[in-house]
């Protein structure tokens, strides 16, 4: 059974922990992030967290309903790192690109935490504020609500999916990561053109690119597609809003077969 969460005003301990610190929600999340970085998800437990904080493990449950509640708090903290102090400039494409790169960077700064949290939906303040901002950017650019939601969906899922993919690489042991990176040079770059003509032709480019994240490229492709759609939609709306041209006005030449009346 989940334990009762003590209100914020009643959460402070009357005395510091063994490390001389007063427990707070933020301190617990910060310590949990550090433990994930050092030990991975398997190393995060209430007992170990209590030891790291110099407090009894049961103290954690005065701040969180359980360990999953703590995971959601970590997820919202990472999202907060991405949106903190970000202010839209009015350039919708530039703003979304900057925000996408911020989200990706925030998760990659904590790869073990990213693997644990990037697939979660928290409904917490930082996540909600970020979603409101993204939808506001899209609607402000002129996208209709249906298109705004569709592009938002693709944008946020793309950023989180690449965060998980790239975080998984960073979370590998160094030897395994280096071995994976060397495959492009030691295997792909040596395949003969007689059996693998397309790989052989592009081998230098593959070696140069494939160990870097494809997220910036994928993000640009998504935004280009959205921009093209907005341009087409704006053109179509302009055509519908334009009043019919009269004979002799620009747009239809007088005397063309389309407007000439046979006698």
Image (tube, rainbow, N blue to C red):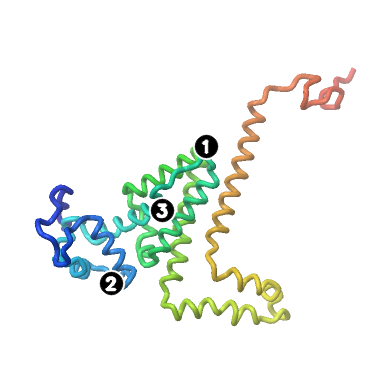
> Residue 138, position in %: x, y?
50, 41
Q: How far apart in space, not on screen, are marks 1 and 2 (Cα)? A: 46 Å
Please tell me which residue lies in front, 157 or 105. 105
Looking at the rendered image, the quarter that the N terminus falls into is bottom left
Kindly identify which residue carries mark 1. Answer: 144
Nearer the N terminus, badge 3 or badge 2? 2
Q: How far apart in space, not on screen, are marks 3 and 2 (Cα)? A: 25 Å
> Residue 26, position in %: x, y?
25, 56
In the rendered structure, the answer to whether residue 145 lies left or right of residue 123 reads right
Residue 82 numbered mark, or none = 3
Mark 3 in CB contact with mark 1 (< 8 angstroms)? no
Mark 1 in CB contact with mark 2 (< 8 angstroms)? no
Task: State the residue at coordinates (47%, 76%).
Answer: 177
Task: State the residue at coordinates (60%, 79%).
Answer: 185
View extreme (right): residue: 263
Height in image: 224 above or below 169? above
Task: State the residue at coordinates (36%, 49%).
Answer: 127
Nearer the N terminus, badge 3 or badge 1? 3
In the rendered structure, the answer to whether residue 218 lies left or right of residue 45 reads right
Please identify, in this view, whether the residue under mark 3 or under mark 2 is nearer the observer. Answer: 3
Nearer the N terminus, badge 1 or badge 2? 2
Q: Tell me the element at label 3.
A: helix
Residue 43 numbered mark, or none = 2
Height in image: 246 above or below 92? above
């Amino acid at each position: 059974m989940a334990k009762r969460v003590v209100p914020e005003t009643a959460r402070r301990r009357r005395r510091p922990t063994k490390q001389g610190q007063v427990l707070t929600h933020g301190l617990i999340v910060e310590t949990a992030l550090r433990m994930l970085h050092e030990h991975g998800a398997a190393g995060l437990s209430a007992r170990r967290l209590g030891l790291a904080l110099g407090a009894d493990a049961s103290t954690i449950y005065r701040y969180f309903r359980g360990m999953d509640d703590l995971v959601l708090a970590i997820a919202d903290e990472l999202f907060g790192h991405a949106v903190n102090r970000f202010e839209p400039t009015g350039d919708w494409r530039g703003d979304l690109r900057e925000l996408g790169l911020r989200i990706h960077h925030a998760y990659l700064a904590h790869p073990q935490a990213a693997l644990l949290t990037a697939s979660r939906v928290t409904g917490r303040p930082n996540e909600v504020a970020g979603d409101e901002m993204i939808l506001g950017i899209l609607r402000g650019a002129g996208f209709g609500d249906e298109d705004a939601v569709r592009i938002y969906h693709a944008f946020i899922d793309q950023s989180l999916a690449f965060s998980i993919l790239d975080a998984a690489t960073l979370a590998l042991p160094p030897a395994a990561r280096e071995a994976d990176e060397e495959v492009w040079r030691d295997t792909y770059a040596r395949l003969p053109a007689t059996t693998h003509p397309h790989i052989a032709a592009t081998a230098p480019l593959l070696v140069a690119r494939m160990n870097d994240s494809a997220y910036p490229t994928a993000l640009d492709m998504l935004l280009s597609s959205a921009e093209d759609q907005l341009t087409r939609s704006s053109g179509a709306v302009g055509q519908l809003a334009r009043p019919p041209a009269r004979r002799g006005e620009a747009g239809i030449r007088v005397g063309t077969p389309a407007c000439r009346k046979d006698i």
